Structure formats: C-alpha cells, structure tokens
Image (cartoon, grey):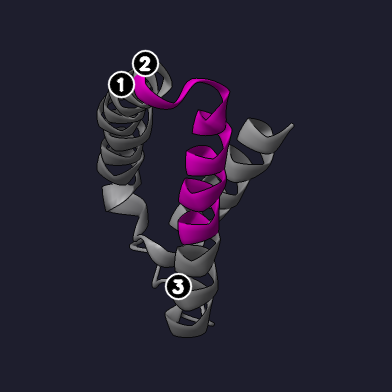
C-alpha cells in the first residue's frame, strides 16, 4: 500500500508540475532514481547495517523514514499550487 500511495502521489505531482511535452522524461527519471539508484543504495546500506547491528537495523530504517517525512513536509511548503502550463 505504501508503494502504491507514493507512486500515485508522484505521478499526480508530475502531471501537475511538468509540462505535457516533458512528462515521459520526468517519469523515466523518477523510475530510474527510485527503483534503480535509491533501492540499490538502500539495499546495500541495509545489508551492511544488518551485518553490524542485527535486528537494531530497524532503528536505522526508522531514521531514514523520518528524514523522508521531513523532506516531504519541506517539499510540500515549496510545491507549486497551480498546474503547469500544458503545451498545445
């Protein structure tokens, strides 16, 4: 459920803030960054942390989630309130 909610929110944000002519590129960058780079890095970090901390790695993931929440709240403040101009 959390992935679906995040994905729909990001796609909605792209539709609202990216001109129609650039949406495919924006969605491709989002997919590469989220499913490729971010997941690869966090999988490596979690594995290394688990080797050292064992089940306490959960606390590290909580910290990562809190940082993500702070980013969401900060981005919400600077988010545009009007949709992007749609190219005809």
Whether 63 is among the magenta residues is yes
- 2 or 3: tag closer to the N-terminus: 2
CA distance separating discs 2 and 3 = 34 Å
**Residue 83 visible to the viewer:** no
Q: Which residue is mark 2?
A: 51
Percent position of residue 59, x then y: 55, 41
Asked whether the residues under the numbered discs 2 and 3 touch, taking CB atoms below 8 Å apart as contact, a structural biologist would say no
CA distance separating discs 2 and 1 = 5 Å
Q: Which residue is mark 1?
A: 48
Picture layout, residue 66 above or below residue 78: above
Percent position of residue 3, x then y: 62, 33
Which residue lies at the image location 50% right of the left edge and 68% below the top edge?
70
Asked whether the residues under the numbered discs 1 and 3 touch, taking CB atoms below 8 Å apart as contact, a structural biologist would say no
Q: Nearer the viewer, mark 2 or mark 3?
A: 2
Picture layout, residue 30 above or below residue 76: above
- Of 64 and 22, nearer the camera is 64
Element on which disc 2 rests: helix
Q: Which residues are magenta?
A: 52-68
Quadrant placement of the C terminus: bottom left
């Amino acid at each position: 459920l959390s992935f679906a909610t995040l994905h729909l929110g990001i796609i909605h944000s792209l539709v609202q803030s990216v001109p129609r002519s650039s949406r495919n590129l924006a969605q491709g960058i989002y997919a590469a960054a989220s499913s490729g780079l971010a997941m690869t890095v966090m999988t490596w970090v979690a594995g290394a942390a688990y080797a050292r901390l064992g089940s306490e790695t959960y606390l590290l993931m909580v910290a990562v989630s809190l940082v993500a929440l702070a980013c969401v709240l900060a981005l919400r403040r600077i988010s545009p309130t009007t949709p992007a101009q749609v190219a005809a």
